[in-house]
Image (cartoon, rainbow, N blue to C red):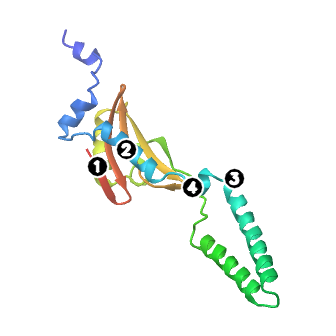
């Protein structure tokens, strides 16, 4: 029949076929997994975040040590200015440690993924080259979903990537860090 072609359902092409048509090779998913593991290790929680109970104990203990050393020095050398200088030195040491961030309590980073529409790729920080390919692929596969993965540490996005999912098939279109592209399809 001449009108059968009009009634036949359109066949969904796989992401691999679409990538081949556009001359692109996806970022291997094992490379993405290795990158995600390496970034989690790089942005692991600080020692003080992992051992939060020790921080107040250490700070209160240092005040106790300061008082004990001042008392001991005053007892050993009566009438000397040494105890006051020793106490001042100890307080200065603790102040410098706090000032230089030794007691910084930073949480670890975590990966978060969210769906993003192709029109907003530029606004969420996807590099133009990766966004362009994602838009072309999405035009050919309208039922595909774009996932933006972000490494978040204390409200700061550190290391994003872009995935596309279509009919259970996943491809990584790119990984970037600020303006530096780590890997791109």
Residue 96 lies left or right of residue 144; in this view the side is right
**How far is disc 3 from disc 1 in space, using C-alphas?**
40 Å
Where is residue 83? Give x, y as percent: 76, 84
Of discs 2 and 1, which sits in the foreground?
1
**Front in this rendered view, residue 58 or 38:** 58
Name the secondary structure under disc 4. helix
**How far is disc 3 from disc 2 in space, using C-alphas?**
38 Å
**How far is disc 4 from disc 3 in space, using C-alphas?**
11 Å
Residues packed near mark 4 inside 10 Å, few (<14), some (14 to 19) or many (20 plus): some
Name the secondary structure under disc 2. strand
**How far is disc 2 from disc 1 in space, using C-alphas?**
11 Å
Label 2 or label 4, whichever comes before in sequence order? 4
Name the secondary structure under disc 3. loop
Q: Residue at x 65, y 75 (%)?
A: 95
Where is residue 168? Give x, y as percent: 37, 25
The residue pinned by badge 2 equals: 162
Q: Residue at x 76, y 85 (%)?
A: 84
Q: Is residue 147 visible?
A: yes
Q: Residue at x 69, y 62 (%)?
A: 58
Label 3 or label 2, whichever comes before in sequence order? 3
The residue pinned by badge 3 equals: 53
The residue pinned by badge 1 equals: 183
**Front in this rendered view, residue 10 or 1:** 10
The residue pinned by badge 4 equals: 47
Label 4 or label 1, whichever comes before in sequence order? 4
Of discs 2 and 4, which sits in the foreground?
4
**How far is disc 4 from disc 1 in space, using C-alphas?**
31 Å
Relative to 2, residue 161 above or below: below
- Which quadrant holds the N terminus? top left
Label 3 or label 1, whichever comes before in sequence order? 3
Residue 63 lies left or right of residue 46; in this view the side is right
Q: Is residue 138 visible?
A: no
């Amino acid at each position: 029949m001449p009108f059968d072609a009009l009634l036949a359902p359109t066949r969904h092409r796989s992401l691999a076929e679409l990538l081949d048509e556009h001359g692109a090779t996806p970022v291997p998913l094992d490379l993405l997994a290795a990158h995600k593991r390496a970034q989690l290790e790089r942005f692991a929680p600080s020692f003080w975040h992992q051992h939060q109970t020790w921080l107040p104990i250490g700070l209160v203990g240092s005040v106790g040590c300061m008082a004990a050393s001042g008392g001991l020095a005053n007892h050993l050398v009566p009438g000397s200015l040494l105890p006051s200088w020793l106490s001042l030195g100890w307080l200065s040491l603790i102040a410098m440690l706090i000032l230089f961030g030794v007691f910084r309590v930073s949480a670890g980073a975590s990966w978060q993924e969210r769906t993003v529409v192709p029109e907003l790729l530029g606004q969420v920080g996807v590099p133009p080259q990766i966004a362009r390919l994602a838009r072309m692929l999405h035009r050919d596969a309208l039922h595909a979903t774009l996932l933006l993965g972000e490494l978040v540490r204390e409200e700061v996005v550190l290391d994003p990537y872009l995935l596309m999912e279509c009919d259970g098939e996943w491809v990584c279109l790119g990984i970037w860090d600020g303006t530096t592209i780590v890997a791109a399809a």
